[in-house]
């Protein structure tokens, strides 16, 4: 949310690692400010057969293992190479993430909505606890 209550939605590059979505953003961005005020968020993603809305709680990650796993997935999926330093990502080429260093967030899904892209796949909802 913007301070005046308007919704805040921006495109971002996210990756799926183990059982969670990861994304990054500069410390001075609205995304990080929003997550500092309240950790609940929604992410949208797509595959060849579904559009997904993933709702969950975002947690900042700074441990080496989580960051390396996310960095490896970013390199594989987007060919985006990052340097891990001081618990954050450092790299060029993240226009929607502000300036480096980039804080890394893990969103563990609580509810996921899947919307089929054609009539052969029904829309559905998954709950996680």
Image (spheres, rainbow, N blue to C red):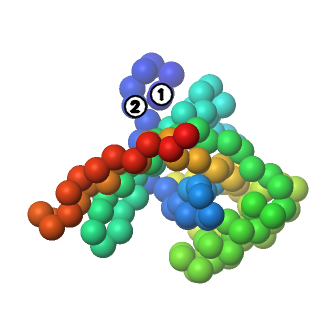
User: Viewer-proximal residue, 65 or 7?
Assistant: 65
Q: Which label was assigned to residue 2?
A: 1
Q: Is residue 106 left or right of residue 42?
A: right
The image quadrant that residue 102 belongs to is: bottom right
In the structure shown, which secondary structural element does the residue marked by tag 2 occupy? Answer: loop
Mark 1 crowd level (few <14, some 14–19, many ≥20, 10 Å Cα): few
Residue 28 visible, this angle: yes
Q: Farthest residue in the left direction?
A: 119
Q: Which label was assigned to residue 7?
A: 2
The residue shown at (51%, 61%) is 13
x and y percentages locating residue 11 in the rendered image: 44, 54
Q: Is residue 105 left or right of residue 54?
A: right
In the structure shown, which secondary structural element does the residue marked by tag 1 occupy? Answer: loop
The image quadrant that residue 21 belongs to is: bottom right
Whether tag 1 and tag 2 are in contact, CB under 8 A, the answer is yes
User: Viewer-proximal residue, 70 or 119?
Assistant: 119
Q: Is residue 39 left or right of residue 55?
A: right
Instruction: Tell me: residue 71, above or below residue 108.
Output: below
x and y percentages locating residue 128 in the rendered image: 50, 44
Mark 2 crowd level (few <14, some 14–19, many ≥20, 10 Å Cα): few
x and y percentages locating residue 25 in the rendered image: 63, 50
Instruction: Tell me: residue 89, above or below residue 32.
Output: below
Q: Farthest residue in the top direction?
A: 4
Residue 29 visible, this angle: no
Of the 4 image quadrants, the one containing the C terminus is top right
Q: Which label was assigned to residue 54?
A: none
The residue shown at (29%, 63%) is 50
User: Viewer-proximal residue, 34 or 60?
Assistant: 60
x and y percentages locating residue 73 in the rendered image: 62, 73
* Mark with earlier residue (1, 2): 1
The residue shown at (20%, 57%) is 122
Q: Work out how far the residue at label 1 is from the one at label 2, CA to CA, in angstroms.
A: 6 Å
């Amino acid at each position: 949310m913007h301070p005046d209550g308007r919704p805040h939605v921006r495109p971002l590059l996210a990756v799926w690692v183990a059982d969670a979505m990861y994304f990054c953003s500069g410390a001075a961005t609205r995304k990080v400010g929003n997550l500092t005020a309240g950790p609940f968020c929604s992410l949208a993603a797509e595959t060849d057969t579904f559009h997904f809305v993933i709702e969950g709680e975002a947690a900042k990650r700074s441990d080496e293992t989580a960051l390396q796993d996310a960095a490896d997935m970013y390199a594989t999926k987007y060919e985006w190479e990052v340097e891990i330093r001081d618990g954050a990502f450092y790299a060029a080429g993240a226009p929607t993430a502000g300036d480096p260093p980039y804080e890394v967030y893990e969103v563990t899904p609580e509810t996921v909505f899947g919307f089929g892209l054609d009539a052969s796949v029904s829309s559905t909802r998954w709950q996680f606890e």
